[in-house]
Image (cartoon, rainbow, N blue to C red):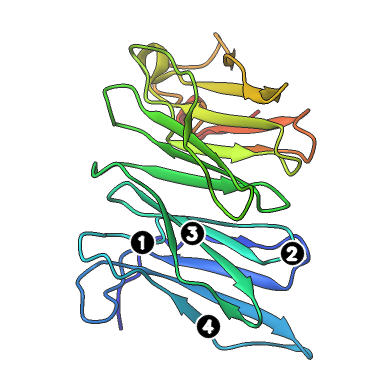
Amino acid sequence: GSNYGVAPIAISGDGNTIVVGYSTASYNNLSFNGYVGVYTYSNGSWSSPTSLSVSDLNVSGLGRSVAINSNGTVIVASTTSGSVYVWKYSNNTWSSSVNLINTTMSGQTSVSISSDGNTVVFGQAFITGRGVVAVWKYSNNSWGTVTYLSVPTSNTQVGSSVTISADGSTIASGDTIYNTNQGQVLIWKYNNGSWGTYITLRNSNLMVNAQLGTAVSINNDGTIITTSAPGDNWIGVWY
């Protein structure tokens, strides 16, 4: 069988839809272009997967990161080649994909989505020398213009992990190379129609190469954040 490697997975808030990213799979006779598998629970059983793919021949690694909103009607997925795609479920079918961005740069990517499905965040490390965190808001049947959040100007690779609170008010992203790979987490709050300047969470007691921010998660209203430092104490820790 195919080697799917690490398969990112996400579940809707209502527990009825599971999304799996098969980023190393070859789909429709294209090598390692990847696809997204969607499983739904109904009448006491899980369905066979619905496969979501894109037609762009330049895409590689679709499903590198996946996310789904609370009621299972909006899915977002990133690629290893720096693209982000969104699908909406309506009238018992998944729409054609909407492409939000193509950075055309290979690197670690991550996506997250708010509970209502109207805010999508994308992170990509190892791009522009410092990493990128980008946000879209859905309004008037359009995803609108991308907003790039403020990030440090040097010695950073923010975007390696991202998360957004369910209410869409707070975004967090890991920067694992800060201070000789000790790592840090950056946080942005949405106020008065705009995303503010980031604040940072750090721990000066971490070991070199602790890589704080490798994974990040946030609660519904953005008041509690948890993150990992897999290189600390040689066994890894959570905060």
User: Looking at the image, which is closer to me, 71 or 9?
Assistant: 71
Q: Nearer the viewer, residue 106 or 115?
A: 115
Question: Which residue is more in the foreground, 22 or 56?
Answer: 56
Circles 1 and 2: CB atoms closer than 8 Å: no
Compute the Cα span from label 1 to label 4. Answer: 16 Å
Q: Secondary structure at mark 3?
A: loop
Q: Secondary structure at mark 2?
A: loop
Mark 4 vs mark 3: which is more N-terminal? 3
Find disc 4 in the rendering and name its residue: 49
Q: Is residue 201 visible?
A: no
- The residue indicated by pointer 3 is 8
| Res 165 visible | yes
Which residue is at a point 75% across and 60% down the rendered structure image? 13
Residue type of the residue flagged with mark 3: Pro
> Observer-nearest residue: 56 or 232?
56
Q: Position of residue 55 (x, y in %)?
A: 30, 70
Mark closer to the observer (4, 3): 4
Q: Residues within 10 Å of mark 4 (few under 14, many from 20)?
A: some
Q: CA distance from mark 2 to mark 4?
A: 18 Å
Earlier in the chain: of badge 1 and badge 4, it is 4
Quadrant of residue 74 in the image? Answer: bottom right
Image quadrant holding the N terminus, namely bottom left
Gap between marks 3 and 2 measured at Cα: 19 Å
- Residue underneath mark 2: 71
The residue located at (63%, 47%) in the rendering is 139
Foreground label between 3 and 2: 2
